[in-house]
Amino acid sequence: EVQLVQSGAEVKKPGESLKISCKGSGYSFTSYWIGWVRQMPGKGLEWMGIIYPGDSDTRYSPSFQGQVTISADKSISTAYLQWSSLKASDTAMYYCARGYSSSWYPWGQGTMVTVSS
Amino acid sequence: QSALTQPASVSGSPGQSITISCTGTSSDVGGYNYVSWYQQHPGKAPKLMIYDVSNRPSGVSNRFSGSKSGNTASLTISGLQAEDEADYYCSSYTSSSTLFVVFGGGTKLTVL
């Protein structure tokens, strides 16, 4: 079964750093793009960026360029999304998804990040 | 502002059919047959319902269908059921960004 499993919920203070993960299983991790999507409370889905673990080709949405870093460790089939200095406005649910044909399937279960002083 | 335009809400009664539109440009929806649709229930991860404009993944009900005309893609749900009440998002490949994928703003489907 193709599956993406994300790390657990996080509660952080403004200014702290954070790295969340997305572990793939049941397929060749290096052969498919992984995308990260933000969903702020009560809002829609926003693409943040994507990475191809095979060669680490990474692309960012202009809205997130410089705000986050996307990476992958193909030795453990895991993609990451990290922040160096969190803001309250980073409070959101974050999903990873695997590129499938021209679509995205499956999706991880989501990681809730809460940033509050 | 989302790159693809969807109506904020649609509604229908059980058994009826509804259609959700997704309007883009020739750089995305109109230029490629790479539109997909996702269903999201409250508190759940999105679920792929349609890919490549009109293809259904295994396990998705044939009550869900997709189509495209010009720069507008559409998701049609026939024989509405209470469980179809959810948010629906379209997504498309785009040639106008190095991040080659964009979402619509989402549509809330209410089953009356």
Image (cartoon, coloured by chain):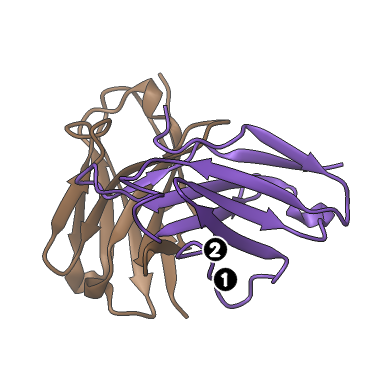
Type of residue at label 1?
Answer: Arg
Mark 2 neighbour density, 10 Å: few (under 14) some (14–19) many (20 or more): many
Q: Is residue B57 visible?
A: yes
In the figure, the shade used to draw chain A is: brown
User: What residue is disc 1 on?
Assistant: B56
Q: Position of residue B39 (x, y in %)?
A: 60, 53
Image mark 1: chain = B
Image mark 2: chain = B
Question: Does B37 appear above or below B63?
Answer: above
Q: Position of residue B88 (x, y in %)?
A: 60, 47
Please indicate whether residue B16 sits to the left or right of residue B96 in the image: right
The reply to the same-chain question for discs 1 and 2 is yes
Q: Position of residue A38 (x, y in %)?
A: 41, 40
Give the CA separation, mark 1 to mark 2. 5 Å
Please indicate whether residue B101 sits to the left or right of residue B103 in the image: left
Q: Residue at x 45, y 65 (%)?
A: B52
What kind of element bears circle 2?
strand
In the figure, the shade used to draw chain B is: purple
Q: Is residue B46 visible?
A: no
Q: Residue at x 39, y 54 (%)?
A: A96
Q: Quadrant of residue A24?
A: bottom left
Q: Position of residue B36 (x, y in %)?
A: 48, 57
Question: Does A100 appear above or below A47?
Answer: below
Quadrant where the C terminus of chain A lies?
A: top left
Type of residue at label 2?
Answer: Ile
Q: Quadrant of residue B61?
A: bottom right
What kind of element bears circle 1?
loop
Mark 1 neighbour density, 10 Å: few (under 14) some (14–19) many (20 or more): some
Question: Does B69 appear above or below A32?
Answer: above
User: What residue is disc 2 on?
Assistant: B50
